């Protein structure tokens, strides 16, 4: 497989983001350096990590050891749930930069809104992230797992909408209402768990679409996300699968496949992760 040309999308502040990247949730510190280096070697230039994943130091090492200039890589990390208070956020952000061996990240996100914690005041957390953007230490700031009322509140109280909202999306949980809101407000949608954490491959419609198109179930599901215009960063530690997941830029879904995959949406029952309104883990 030759290195595919990965499309980039424009963020509301003018920066470019590769539409396809590599996710690192639950990649152990032990596996992380080699796996991220492998992904970079294949031509992936967008890495998604988080303070919560306890692998920022390994991601930083992988980037450094890859020899690829820092400015060619789009690097995202996220504020941990126990670091929402402004002083904690400032300290932990500085630690993230140190661990990642860089003086800026391309994107820094509030990982969860935690509306039942910190007196529900995710607005002060957002203001703190805006400081990092002003300082140029985060080129772009955004949020993750925010619902429409959370986003509306940020706009009302600070006048600034996040450039990005990273939320769960895959054919079992299409999250269409939130995506429409994003479109109206120029918020880029990042789709986490684009493979529904591996739970979607047994679906008959996915299997028959894969056969019809001569692709694998994972490739068909990822292509669905790409064609909807979302940013994706599937996770795997298996080299063959990482390669397979990237090999989705030489085909298109036919109308039948799009209709079949769109019909798999189970609404709230399709979520694989926590609900943002109640998620309260520190
Ligand atoms: P995913 O949907 O990417 O699925 C990953 C699982 O699918 C792997 O564990 C593997 O078992 C399987 N898989 C991957 N490629 C495969 C292939 N080609 N064939 C068969 N099986 C395959 O799930 P994810 O890791 O939860 O999500 C991707 C990334 O999104 C994460 O690594 C992380 O960076 C991000 N994320 C963010 C949040 C958030 O709250 N912001 C939450 C979850 C994930």
Image (cartoon, rainbow, N blue to C red):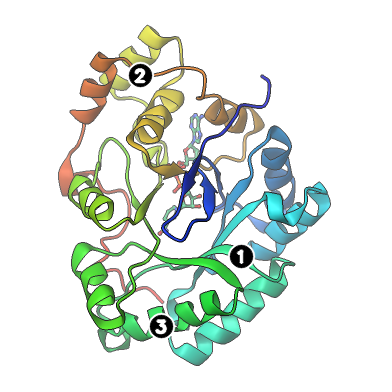
Vertical position of residue 132 compared to residue 61: above or below? below
At mark 3, the secondary structure is: helix
Residue nearest the viewer, comparing 113 with 103: 103
Q: Cβ(mark 1) to ligand 1 < 8 Å? A: no
Closer to viewer: mark 3 or mark 2: 3
The residue that disc 2 covers is 253
Q: Earlier in the sequence, mark 1 or mark 3?
A: 1
Kindly tell me whether residue 278 is visible in this rendering: no
Residue 163: give x, y in percent of width and height: 40, 61
**Most distant residue in the front direction:** 14
- Neighbor class of circle 3 (other Cα within 10 Å; few <14, some 14-19, many 20+) is some
The residue that disc 3 covers is 127
Mark sitting on residue 105: 1
Q: Is residue 218 left or right of residue 77?
A: left
Residue nearest the viewer, comparing 267 with 27: 267
Determine the image quadrant of residue 53. bottom right
Q: Are marks 1 and 2 in contact (CB under 8 Å)?
A: no
Residue 145: give x, y in percent of width and height: 33, 62
């Amino acid at each position: 497989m030759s290195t595919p040309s990965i499309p980039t999308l424009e963020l509301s502040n003018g920066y470019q983001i590769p539409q396809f990247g590599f996710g690192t949730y639950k990649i152990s510190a032990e596996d992380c350096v080699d796996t991220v280096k492998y992904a970079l070697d294949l031509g992936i230039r967008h890495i998604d990590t988080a303070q919560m994943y306890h692998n920022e130091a390994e991601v930083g090492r992988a980037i450094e050891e890859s020899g690829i200039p820092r400015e060619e890589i789009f690097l995202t990390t996220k504020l941990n749930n126990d670091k929402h208070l402004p002083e904690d956020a400032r300290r932990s952000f500085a630690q993230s930069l140190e661990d990642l061996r860089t003086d800026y990240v391309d994107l820094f996100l509030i990982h969860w809104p935690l509306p039942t914690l910190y007196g529900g005041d995710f607005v002060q957390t957002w203001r703190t992230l805006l400081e990092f953007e002003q300082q140029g230490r985060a080129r772009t700031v955004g949020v993750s797992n925010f619902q429409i009322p959370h986003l509306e509140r940020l706009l009302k109280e600070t006048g600034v909408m996040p450039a990005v909202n990273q939320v769960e999306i895959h054919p079992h949980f299409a999250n269409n209402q939130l995506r429409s809101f994003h479109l109206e407000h120029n918020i880029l949608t990042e789709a986490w768990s684009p493979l529904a954490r591996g739970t979607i491959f047994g679906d008959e419609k996915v299997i028959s679409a894969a056969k019809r198109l001569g692709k694998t179930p994972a490739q068909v599901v990822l292509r669905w996300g790409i064609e909807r215009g979302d940013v994706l960063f599937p996770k795997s530690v298996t080299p063959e699968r990482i390669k397979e997941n990237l090999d989705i830029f030489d085909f298109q879904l036919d109308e039948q496949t799009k209709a079949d995959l769109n019909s798999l949406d189970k609404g709230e029952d399709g979520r694989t992760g926590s609900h943002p309104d109640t998620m309260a883990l520190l």
